[in-house]
Image (cartoon, helix red, strand yellow):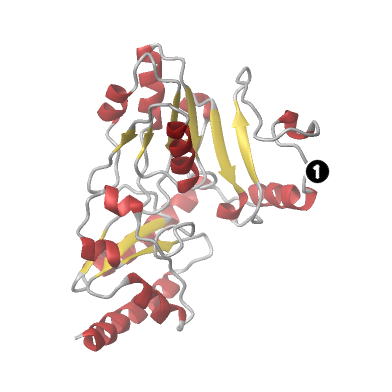
Amino acid sequence: MTTAIEHPSVLNAAKELEREGFEVVRLAPDEWGKISPDAVRKAVTPETILVSMMRVNNEVGSILPVEAAADAIEEAKAPALLHVDAVQAFGKLPISVRRLRVDLMSMSAHKIHGPKGVGALFLRRGVHIEPLAYGGGQEKDLRPGTESMPLIAGFGAAVNALPDLESELAAMRELNGFCRDKLAALPGVAVNSPEDALPYILNFSAGAVRAETMLHFLSEKGIYVSSGSACSRGRESHVLKAMRLPQERIASALRLSFCRFNTKSEAEIFLRALREGLSRLAAQKG
């Protein structure tokens, strides 16, 4: 069991399992990218062997009910392992593998200002998984090959540099809320992230201006946003499609990603540029 809004790294693995003969259940979100805890409980059966669910959606920031998945596995007495993609949550939300009752949890350094190309996998004691490749005995035989010590050290340094989570969350909520209010007041603009989303992510649709057009307009002014996941490579968002948003909103959707180094003055610069882009680009289109 998984959801329809997972990262391609999980969705494509699920497709491969289907090709191998496994049944895969993909839970659909509501119009705000949320997954119902009741749907999770109904989907897990005594035959379920794996549940893979992200903690935070990478495009709209919705927080998924991992706790409900753990409850469902226990209630169904299923032999399932619970894997959580915590890439967007790690270092931004308080996470306890014991409280969440997860068996596996994946994390990545580049989402907390660490180097690209290095991540971590939590594996609960007693859980055994087959390696994808065989070779040396590195990393408990799970991933053979000489470890990249500079990348690992960089990941460790990024973890050590993490600020206090609660105070940082409060600051991000304030910055996100400021942008959300200003965006909602712009004609034709619609906010796609739910109110209780992780405040580091804010997804919105830029009216009649296509995402790629607005993205290039903003980048020329030194403002860098994204049109969905970095792994989507120009394709329309599968997350927004699963949320059943109108096609115009999907085609014009952009994602703001905040970090602890962003300021309100930078947000104001972005908003001024967006207003200019909405005016100029819509006029050109007309």
Q: Nearer the viewer, residue 106 or 198?
A: 106
Please give the name of the residue rendered at 28% of the width and 39% of the height, measured from the top-left corner. 28
**Residue 114, percent from left and from top:** 64, 55
Up/down of 126 relative to 263, above or below: above
Examine the image and state in which quarter residue 187 appears: bottom left
Please give the name of the residue rendered at 22% of the width and 87% of the height, measured from the top-left corner. 283
Up/down of 119 relative to 20, above or below: below
* Residue type (three-letter) at the residue carrying disc 1: Thr
How would you rate the neighbour count of disc 1 (Cα within 10 Å): few for under 14, some for 14-19, many for 20 or more? few
Task: Say which element carries label 1.
Answer: loop
**Residue 240, percent from left and from top:** 30, 54
Quarter that holds the C terminus: bottom left
How many labels sit on residues? 1
Q: Nearer the viewer, residue 183 or 35?
A: 35
Please give the name of the residue rendered at 60% of the width and 57% of the height, measured from the top-left corner. 113
User: Is residue 218 visible to the viewer in this orientation of the structure?
Assistant: yes
**Residue 180, percent from left and from top:** 30, 63
Quarter that holds the N terminus: top left
Up/down of 57 relative to 128, above or below: below
Q: Residue furthest top?
A: 77
Q: Residue tagged by mark 1?
A: 146
Q: Is residue 226 left or right of residue 96?
A: left
Q: Nearer the viewer, residue 157 or 43?
A: 43
Q: Nearer the viewer, residue 55 or 211?
A: 211
User: Is residue 194 visible to the viewer in this orientation of the structure?
Assistant: no
**Residue 193, percent from left and from top:** 30, 54
